[in-house]
Structures are given as C-alpha cells and as structure tokens.
C-alpha cells in the first residue's frame, strides 16, 4: 500500500509544505512499514506535548493529551481485566457530546469500536445486533434505553460508564458481567490493517452495510486533511456533527487528535450559540453538512461583530452539496474561505477544495488526491474530461471490503478499485463535480434526471432545511419526479411556491409535479435521507380500484374504449369504472381520446362530455344517448348546493376546462359551480372586446341563476370577463360578493403599452392587414411584460414595433414605385419569435381565435367598480388593478401561468381561503 509516490505528489495535489510530519514522518522514513496504530499516534502526542489540550468542552476543565492518555490506559486495563482483547467488538451507545467521543477513541485504542446511535428504533437496534456479532455494549450507568434492553435480550455484556465530577471530562467504566472466556496469547496490539471501528450504513437503500475502517485507513485519511488544510497542533476543531457517522467521527474527532490538535465541544450542537461556539471555544475550523451551515448562517449573517469575534481559518462542508448562497453568506459573515470536499464512508475524504492560495473552484468537490480516483463509463473505460461516469476510488483510505458481504464485495471492489455508485465528472483542471447516485437516476420518459440537481436547487430556497427528490410511478412516462422538503423553523412555504422557484432555475421537465412539505425526512443510520421510503410512502397513498364487472353495456365498444385508454394512458390494468384523469390523463390526452372516439362511433362528440363522464361506463351511457356534438357553453356542477353559486370562466381558449371538474369536487357538493366556456370554441365568433364577451354570457348566467348573490371567478382572460360580468350584474341591481381573478393580465395598466397600442391602431390604415399579425405579436409581448421579472418581453414588443415601422416605410416606398409591396408575412427584418411551446393550450400567432383575444386585450381598459377583488398573481402582477378596486387583495402564487389550472388542489384551497377571509357567504 503506497501513500506517496514521491515528494512531487504533494505538489500535484496543490497541498502545502511542512504539514504531514506529525503523522507520516515515520511512514516516509520507512515506506515498507504500516502507518501504525491510532493509540501510538495519540501516545506520541502525549509525550511531545503532554499539557496541550486534546479535548475542550463548555463547563468542564480541558483534557490534556497526558490526561487523555491516562484515560485510555485505564480504559484498556479495565477491558483486559474483564477478558476483552484487541479484537473484541464493543458498541458505544452514549449520548452525543465529548463523552461519546472519548468512549469511541478509548475503545478504538483498546479493541474495535462500534459507534451506535442510541436514538435508533428498537427494530433497527435488533437488526444491527444480529449482524454485528458484538461482544459488549458500553452504556451510561443505570440508563433505561432500547439499546440496553436489546443487549440484555441478546445476553451481551454491558459495560457501564460512570460519569466523573461535573467539572472533569472523562468517566470510569464498570463491567456488569465478566467475560469468562480466557484471553488468548495474541498481542495486546492489533495489526494496523485490522478494524479500528466499524461503521454501519445503509446509504439510501438496502440492508445495513458494515464498514471496517482500519487504523491504517484512519491515519492516512487524517494525513490527507492535514496536508490539504495545513493542520497544526494550534488548530482547534469544533465538533458539532454526530460522531456515530463517518464524517463526524473521522473528520472532527480522529483527525484533530491524530494531528495533535484540539477538539472543542459546545454544550448542545442542536442549539447554536455564537458566543459559545466561536468566542468561548475559539475553533480555528469546523466541518459539517449544509443543514448545520445554514443554521450558523441564520444566526450570524446580521451580527456586526461576526468577523472579529472568532478565530476561524476556514470552514469545511461535506456530505451533501452546499447551496451557493449559504457558502457565500458564510464567507461574507466570517471573512474566511468555505470549501467543499468529497468522501464516502468506505474511503474517507478523497477530493477537496483548498483554502487560498491552494486550488479552489466553488460548486465542485475540489481536486482528488493523486492516483486515487477515476471516472469510468458503463464498460469500465475512463471517460474524457467533462464526461459523466461512475466514480471509482482506491488508495490507503479505502477499506478492504465490507464485513460478511461476499457478493457485495465481489461487485463493489474490482481490480483494486472501489465502485462508489456516485456519478461524477472531472473538468480539464481535474476538479470533481458530483451529479448523483447511479441508482437514484429518474427515467421520466425519454428524459434522465439526477435527484441531486433538484435537491441542490431546493436547498437554495431560504425556507428549505432539507430536501430529497425521488421517482414516483407515472402511468404514461414510467417514472415522474416528486420531492419532499423539511423547512427551517419559523418558515412557511407552499408546494406551488417551491415549484415556481424551481421553474426559474431548472428545465420544466425536472420540476417535480408534487413537492411534499414534511416535518422531517426519513433517514438511515448514517443520517442520509432514504429516498426509497419517500417513494414508497407516496405510492402507498394510491389505492388500486376494485374490478367492477361489465353489466348492460355494449361489449364491443367497451373493449375498444378499454384498449384506447390502455394505449393512451400506458397504465396497468383498467376497469370500466376507472377515472380517466385519476389514471394519469390530462387535457391533451383527453382531446386525443375524443378524436379517437369520434372515429369509433362515426359521429362528433362534444368535448363537454368529459365533465359528466370520466369513466368508460359513464362514457358508454352518454354515447348511447343523443349527446349533442356541440360543446356546452354553460355547465352546472353540484347545482343543488346551498352556497351562493360560483360562476367560473375557465379561460382555456384552446382547451375545455376539464380542471374545473376536479376543482368542483374539491370545493365540495355544497358549492354550486357554473362553468362558462370562452368564446371561440367550435370556431364560434369571438367578440371584439372584453365588455362584449361579458354581455354575451350574461344572459346564460341569468337564466341559470336569476338572482344573486353571485361569486365570480375566472382564469387568465376569463378573469377579465368575470370582472366585466360583475359590473353588469351590479348595474342590474344584483349582489356580487367577490370577483376572483386567476393570473389575469391587464395590458393597458402600463402607460407605455397604452401609447404603443394607440400608435399601432393609427398605423393600421397605412399598411392594411399587414399590421394585424404584428399587432398580435406586440400585444402578446406586452401582456407578458406585465409578468414579474420579464423585461425581455418589453424589448421583444419594441422589436415588433420597429418591424411595423419598417413595414410602413417599405409600403410607402412601394407606393412610390421603389419596390414591390410587402405582404403580411414575417421577413428577415422581424424579430425571431419564441411562442409558448404548446399550441394546443396557447394557440399560434396566425390563429384567428388567438388574434381575436389579443385584439380584445389591446382595446380593454377596465374602469373602477365598487367590489371586492381577489387576484391570484402568478406571472401577471396585480398592480394594474389597484386603481380599479379599493378592496383588492393580492394572493401571490409561485409557478408559471398554467399553475392555477395544473395544481388544482392548491387552487381549491386558495379559493376556499379567499371566500372565508372575505366573509363570503356569511
């Protein structure tokens, strides 16, 4: 086993000189020897610096290296007297703090330590006891815990820790049962290749893995950290991470002791106290995961004395990607570098960014230690820089294999390399970037998604403390993306707000369709979030419907419809009572299904049929009647409800408002909902103004509901029609309780827009029909310019105005005989267009219905009405409506413009809250 190839290896890793003599000096002098034992390294420090503090804890006297050595000697003598030799496996189940760290260190120097989290469930403890083959368990004296009860049931020897006086660090141990087995003649010193401690990990899947980390492994790992970060005896490491897990134990306990430094312990690592952590304890560095870093930042960012009230040289982060704003915030608050590193339980730290003047590239895991890391493709071939592949590790910090796992070792350790299962890439400068876990890849149709990318983005949100993305079944795509988050204390955020946030930084196909806000995320024994449990818990909420026999229905048509649904939905077995939308159907699939049904039965079918028939049985009953082929302009859902009717203008110019059926179900049978379709369906006439649209629909509404009170609501342009309908009803003496507008635009709310549209209108006579398509494009960008943070749309609108001016000039020249007249088509002088991606929902720029609505928007200037308005703002601002109503209430939703009709559950809850807040219906 080699540690350094030659003296130039240090330069290759961009490390610093003179930083490894305290650990590897003997190793370099005699490269054929093992690195030694942890106990030998600590004893060396006890001789060279006996009075130097090894452990410091708030409220206790510092423990010097001399005192630490005495503690270890007494601990070892007691174990030997009880019959436990260097190969005995002793579980350490003390609570978090300096005493558990001392217990693990002393056990490591005397036997094989097995750090044990006492907060594990009884079932987890029983499982671990079965596979660990323990000899004894170290517990607090007279404690009553699940670990003790499990040990007693298993007949294990219990070693009790008796606390010293309050002001002293350390404890004495008492063995309740003496090991009757006679010690063999084996040496009191273990071999450096034997385990120093055994870690338990299940990662994010599978049964627990037992990781035997040897003395050689640990000493080599500490030497790397010493070389990277120039650790010296004067350095003090703050321990705020659980020592039961790899990172807390290796980095923040053994590394300080092996480098002759000091470990400092706060009173309670779960309760941050700036003065105690950084002023009293005076650490020069600490290492933790993103959750603790965010906690520190929250309590430090606003402190004016933060930069001067600490002794930190640098801050380390590992275990998960650190959000950029946390890294930059900590650096700004403390004035020291914050660097990330990469490691695993099986191999310790393998790559790291180094504080200046060393190499560092934020957002990466740094440069790997020489000759220890490669990235390979599926065939085991090393990939080129920038390409992704699986990370393989080797070197003195990598374990020789898992305990009692022959098959796992055969697949995980190949030709001297450990296959991590992590997917990464190395850039041209050899900086490592992580992309995810091989087994965590989500296959969403043809799109491949790494959960870590979504988790990184979620963790940048100021309200999110922890995040996990995972796969959930999808009837058509195979898998879809979901996510769960745990929030920081005192914060609140809605799922749709998080989806909006992600939509601004991720591609749309990567944005989870569902984000669950949970009190906590399930974790394994190492503290890693278990994605499979999240996925399973979500899947368990879906209950498969019971098969219903086909009764008096046409067998052939039933078979044809079932085959059609199976083909479209790509779901499992179907019954004739399965709901189309609950099985994964959406508006686009519904439109395709209706076209196919028309081909089957040979006559047109009204799109409105899916409001009343969402199962095969219901469809067949409807199709057997005389269903009109014309779409229904007005549909009544739960008309017998006792509450004032909700008149809902669904606003889907190119859809059928199927979302309103689910919305009505969520609002409950006590809420009548009258759905009004927009003009233009079935290619009917589109009135030239919003006011005309409202007047045309008023007669239908009064016929269905002759008198108020009314509740009016509408999505997009439907919200404008709802507002104008409310004006007409109030003028007729009727009561309108509230108007709810869902992301409804108001183009003429901008002075620039009013001026531009006036100019467009006046230019039309000079260029005839040439102005119309350009006006549609310009107005569409003006509408989008009303969205938050979308200044580029104003530039696009201005570009179309310039295009129109160019057209006017060309037309004028043509009339003078200078050139051929310009036709109404886009040419090279017009800006490149970027319409929405879904013509089925948003239409095309040349479509007459699309043009008609934008013309109506261009001419619409709402006037004040004394009425309560609730505006759900997603992409369109509500500012333009403040002069229209003195009773305007804005509810900001995060997402894109389609969010209100895609996230129907959130929409329903917002509506119910809006009605309740305004006292509607009381």
Image (spheres, rainbow, N blue to C red):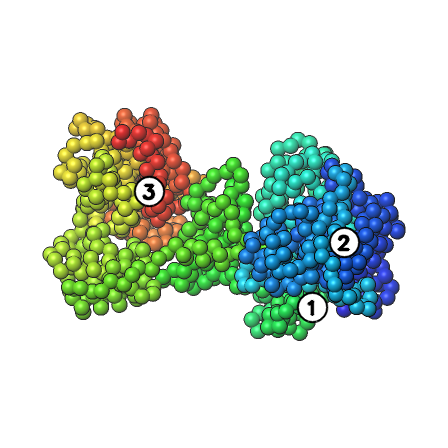
Q: How many marks?
A: 3
Compared across the picture, whether 878 is left or right of 95 comes to left
Q: Residues within 10 Å of mark 2 (few under 14, many from 20)?
A: many
Badge 1 marks a residue whose secondary structure is: loop
Residue 612 at what x, y percent from top left? 21, 52
Badge 3 marks a residue whose secondary structure is: helix
Q: Height in image: 155 above or below 489?
A: below
* Res 4 visible: no
Residue 411 at what x, y percent from top left? 60, 72
Badge 2 marks a residue whose secondary structure is: helix
Q: What residue do we see at 15% from left, 39% from top? A: 704
Screen quadrant of the N terminus: bottom right
Q: Height in image: 463 above or below 210?
A: above
Name the one closer to the observer, 481 or 354: 481
Q: Residue furthest left?
A: 626
* Res 896 visible: yes
Dot 3 corresponds to which residue? 908
Q: CA distance from mark 3 to mark 1?
A: 57 Å
- For marks 2 and 1, the one nearer the N-term is 2
Q: CA distance from mark 2 to mark 1?
A: 24 Å
Dot 1 corresponds to which residue? 400
Task: Give the number of the disc on residue 106.
Answer: 2
Name the one closer to the observer, 283 or 172: 172
Residue 81, picture quadrant: bottom right
Residue 503 at what x, y percent from top left? 45, 48
Q: What residue do we see at 47% from left, 52% from top? A: 483
The mark lying in front, picked from 3 and 1, is 1
The mark lying in front, picked from 2 and 3, is 2
Q: What residue do we see at 14% from left, 34% from top? A: 706
Residue 701 at what x, y percent from top left? 17, 38
Q: What residue do we see at 59% from left, 46% from top? A: 291
Compared across the picture, whether 168 is left or right of 732 comes to right
């Amino acid at each position: 086993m080699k540690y350094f190839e030659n003296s130039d290896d240090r330069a290759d890793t961009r490390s610093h000189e003179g930083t490894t003599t305290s650990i590897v000096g003997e190793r370099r002098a005699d490269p054929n020897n093992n690195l030694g034992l942890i106990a030998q390294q600590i004893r060396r420090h006890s001789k060279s610096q006996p009075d130097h503090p090894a452990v410091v804890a708030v409220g206790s006297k510092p423990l010097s290296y001399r005192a630490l050595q005495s503690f270890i000697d007494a601990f070892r003598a007691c174990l030997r007297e009880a019959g436990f030799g260097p190969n005995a496996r002793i579980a350490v189940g003390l609570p978090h703090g300096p005493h558990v760290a001392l217990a693990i260190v002393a056990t490591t120097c005397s036997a094989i330590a097995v750090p044990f989290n006492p907060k594990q469930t009884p079932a987890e403890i029983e499982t671990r006891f079965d596979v660990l083959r323990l000899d004894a368990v170290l517990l607090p004296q007279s404690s009553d815990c699940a670990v003790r009860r499990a040990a007693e049931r298993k007949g294990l020897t219990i070693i009790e820790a008796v606390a010293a006086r309050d002001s002293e660090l350390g404890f004495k141990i008492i063995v309740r049962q003496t090991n009757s087995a006679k010690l063999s003649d084996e040496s009191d010193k273990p071999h450096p290749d034997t385990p120093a401690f055994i870690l338990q990990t299940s990662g994010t899947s599978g049964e627990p893995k037992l990781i035997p980390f040897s003395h050689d492994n640990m000493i080599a790992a500490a030497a790397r950290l010493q070389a990277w970060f120039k650790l010296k005896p004067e350095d003090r490491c703050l321990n705020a991470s659980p020592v039961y897990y790899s990172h807390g134990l290796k980095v923040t306990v053994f590394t300080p002791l092996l480098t002759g430094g000091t470990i400092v312990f706060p009173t309670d690592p779960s309760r941050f106290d700036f003065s105690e952590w950084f002023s009293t304890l005076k650490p020069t560095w600490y290492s933790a995961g993103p959750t603790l870093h965010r906690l520190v930042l929250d309590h430090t960012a606003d402190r004016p004395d933060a930069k001067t009230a600490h002794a930190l040289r640098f801050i380390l982060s590992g275990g998960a990607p650190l959000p950029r704003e946390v890294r930059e915030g900590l650096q700004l608050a403390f004035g020291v570098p914050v660097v990330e590193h990469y490691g695993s339980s099986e191999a310790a730290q393998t790559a790291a960014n180094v504080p200046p003047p060393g190499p560092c590239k934020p957002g990466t895991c740094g440069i790997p230690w020489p000759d220890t890391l490669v990235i390979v493709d599926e065939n085991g071939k090393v990939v080129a820089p920038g390409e992704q592949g699986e990370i393989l590790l080797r070197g003195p910090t990598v374990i020789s294999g898992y305990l009692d796992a022959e098959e796992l070792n055969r697949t995980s350790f190949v030709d001297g390399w450990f296959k991590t299962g992590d997917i990464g890439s190395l850039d041209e400068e050899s900086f490592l970037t992580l992309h995810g876990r091989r087994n965590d890849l989500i296959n969403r149709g043809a799109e491949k998604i790494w959960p870590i990318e979504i988790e990184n983005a979620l963790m940048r949100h100021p309200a999110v403390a922890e995040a996990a993305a995972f796969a959930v079944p999808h009837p058509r795509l195979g898998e879809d993306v979901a996510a769960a988050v745990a929030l920081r204390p005192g914060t609140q955020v809605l799922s749709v707000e998080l989806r909006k946030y992600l939509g601004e930084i991720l591609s749309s196909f990567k944005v989870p369709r569902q984000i669950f806000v949970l009190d906590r995320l399930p974790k394994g024994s190492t503290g890693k979030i278990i994605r499979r449990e999240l996925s399973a818990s979500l899947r368990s909420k879906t209950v498969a419907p019971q098969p219903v026999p086909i009764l008096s229905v046409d067998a052939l048509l039933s078979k044809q419809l079932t085959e059609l649904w199976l083909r479209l939905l790509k779901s499992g077995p179907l019954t004739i009572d399965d709901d189309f939308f609950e099985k994964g159907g959406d508006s686009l699939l519904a439109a395709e299904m209706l076209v196919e049904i028309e081909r089957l039965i040979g006559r047109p079918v009204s799109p409105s049929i899916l409001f009343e028939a969402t199962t095969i049985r219901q469809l067949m009953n409807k199709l057997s009647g005389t269903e009109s082929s014309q779409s229904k302009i007005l549909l009544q859902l739960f008309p017998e409800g006792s509450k004032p009717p909700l008149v809902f203008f669904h606003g889907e110019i190119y859809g059928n408002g199927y979302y309103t059926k689910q919305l009505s179900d969520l609002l409950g049978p006590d809420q009548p909902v009258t759905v009004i379709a927009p003009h233009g369906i079935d290619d009917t006439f589109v009135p030239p103004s919003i006011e005309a649209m409202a007047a045309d629909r008023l007669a239908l509404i009064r016929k269905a509901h002759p008198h108020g009170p009314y509740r009016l609501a509408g999505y997009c342009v439907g919200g404008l029609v709802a507002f104008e309908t409310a004006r007409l009803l109030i003028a007729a003496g009727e009561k309108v309780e509230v108007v709810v507008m869902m992301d409804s635009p108001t183009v003429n709310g901008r002075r620039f827009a009013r001026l531009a549209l006036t100019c467009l209108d006046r230019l039309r006579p000079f260029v005839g029909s040439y102005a119309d398509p350009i006006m549609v494009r310009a107005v569409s960008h003006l509408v989008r310019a009303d969205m938050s943070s979308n200044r580029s749309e104003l530039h696009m609108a201005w570009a179309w105005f310039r295009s129109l001016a160019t057209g006017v000039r060309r037309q004028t020249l043509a009339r003078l005989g200078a050139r051929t007249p310009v036709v109404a088509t886009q040419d090279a002088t017009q800006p490149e267009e970027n319409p929405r991606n879904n013509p089925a929902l948003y239409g095309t720029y040349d479509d007459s219905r699309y043009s008609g609505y934008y013309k109506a928007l261009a001419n619409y200037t709402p006037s004040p009405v004394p009425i309560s308005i609730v505006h759900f703002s997603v992409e369109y601002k509500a500012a333009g409506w403040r002069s229209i109503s003195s009773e305007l209430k804005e509810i900001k939703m995060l997402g894109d413009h389609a969010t209100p009709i895609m996230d129907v559950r959130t929409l329903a809850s917002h509506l119910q809250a809006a009605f309740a807040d305004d006292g509607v219906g009381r």
